[in-house]
Amino acid sequence: MHAMSGAAAAGQLEERAYLSAETDAKLEQSGSLVAANTDNLREALALLAALEKRCRVGNDSPSLVRVCEASLQLCKDCSDDEALVATLKNLATRRSQKTKAVSALVHKAMPWVLKGDGYTPLPVQNDEQKAIRERLVVALMEITDGKIFLEAERARLTRALSTIKEEDGDIAGAAEVLQDVHVETYGSLSKREKVEFILEQMRLTLGKNDYVRAAIVAGKINRKAIQEEGMEAEKIKFFTLMTEYHRHEKDTFELAKDYHSIYSTSTIQADELQWKEALLYTVLFLALSQYGNEQQDMMNRINSDPNLEKIESCRDTVKLLLKKEIVNYPLPHQAELEAMPAFSLGGADLAAHWHKTFRTRIVQHNVRIAALYYRRIHGKRLAQLLGMDPVALEAEIASMVSDGSVYAKIDRPSDIIRFSQKKTPEAILTDWATDISSLLHLVEATTHLIHKEQMTQ
């Protein structure tokens, strides 16, 4: 009996009232009231509020949506912004309000504060209009908070509020508005919208010099997504922002990879002026990078790029650094490379740091070449070959030994630098056995060729 009565009660709750005819009449009546005199707005809203309750309780969702939208439209037609915000909040927060009604209210009001792209605030004429616009955006954000069916709208409103704060010069406030939105988890947003939102987060966090958070936000970008066709603008923007971050970190190899990613974008490849600039920056920061397997691999890949031949400074610099020869400092095209805008971005102090790093990389290159050809050499002679002060050379070799890029031992009293590592007896025996094996293989191959020649005669 109890189960049946519960089912009956549920059935009663789900019963729907059909109020479309009454809704038509009330909407016409409220419209006539406002048309006669805008001072009748309160009376018209009260009339619709009573109807809204009946539609909500009676589960007549289509009529409910019409009443809610009409209420907002009356406020808009009367240019009563205070009533508009109040009506919006009141209708959206009613007890047991239908999701369709809330969604309709949000979609009705959004075009009044946002442009057609869905996230750029509409321009305003004065401070009063700006305040109303911000209040309406905040009210819509409060309504959409926690509602999964409106998560896309909330993301767009958040971007709009961030833009409003940025227009007022509050970069920190704009970044704070965006940073707590985990848009990457939203299922209703397109891939492009997610990427654009995260790029905005990156831009604003970098704008307020929050480099730690910028690195965290950058990790949310799906690298495969921005490599897809049609995402070229987002890819370029992302790696341009990454150059700002890596420039702050003074990470030259990552800078080279950033500029190479920009260079490899199809839209950049279509513009000769742009790809030449990106390739120049790639070579510049690759030359400033610490020697390593990745750096050498990238240097060889760029060396095989046909476009390299079209830029003399890039071609000569790459070929010089790949040769197993000592090079003179400064490089033939170093002044041209250092004159590029990317070299001086970040201020005079950073440019001075890059200039010092350039010399260090050339010295390190020359020391590696010396270690390749010499088992041991006098320090003064090596300093003469490299055109350096012996004390400065010793300090640089010590630094390279510390980071493991070269093996060396310095005998100061004798002024001898040993680059060849003393082999253990086991290593010598292994080398000897390898040499003997190679010799026997060569003898066997030679004997076989001699017998073959004799048999053919």
Image (cartoon, rainbow, N blue to C red):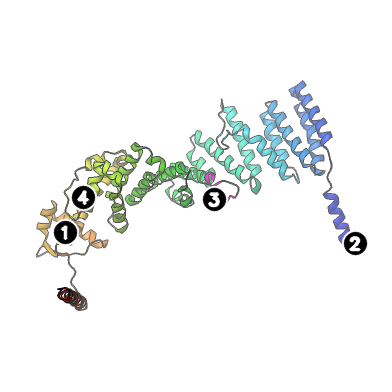
Q: Please give the label number shown on residue 184.
A: 3
In what element is the residue under mark 1?
helix
Q: 269 or 141, which lies in front? A: 269
Residue numbers of the magenta segment? 181-193
Q: Which residue is mark 4?
A: 320
In what element is the residue under mark 2?
loop
Is the residue under label 1 in contact with that under label 4 (CB below 8 Å)? no
Is the residue under label 4 in contact with that under label 2 (CB below 8 Å)? no
Whole-angstrom CA distance, mark 2 to mark 3, is 50 Å
Q: Which residue is mark 2?
A: 1
In this rendering, position of residue 212 left or right of residue 441:
right
Residue 224 located within the stretch drawn in magenta? no
Tell me the quadrant of the picture where the N terminus can be found: bottom right
Is the residue under label 3 in contact with that under label 2 (CB below 8 Å)? no
Tell me the quadrant of the picture where the C terminus can be found: bottom left
Q: Earlier in the sequence, mark 2 or mark 3?
A: 2
Q: Earlier in the sequence, mark 2 or mark 4?
A: 2
What amino acid is labelled 3 in the image? Glu
What amino acid is labelled 1 in the image? Ala
- Residue 64 falls in image quadrant: top right
Residue 191 placed where, x, y %?
54, 47
- Where is 279 relative to 293, above or below? above
In this rendering, position of residue 27 left or right of residue 316:
right
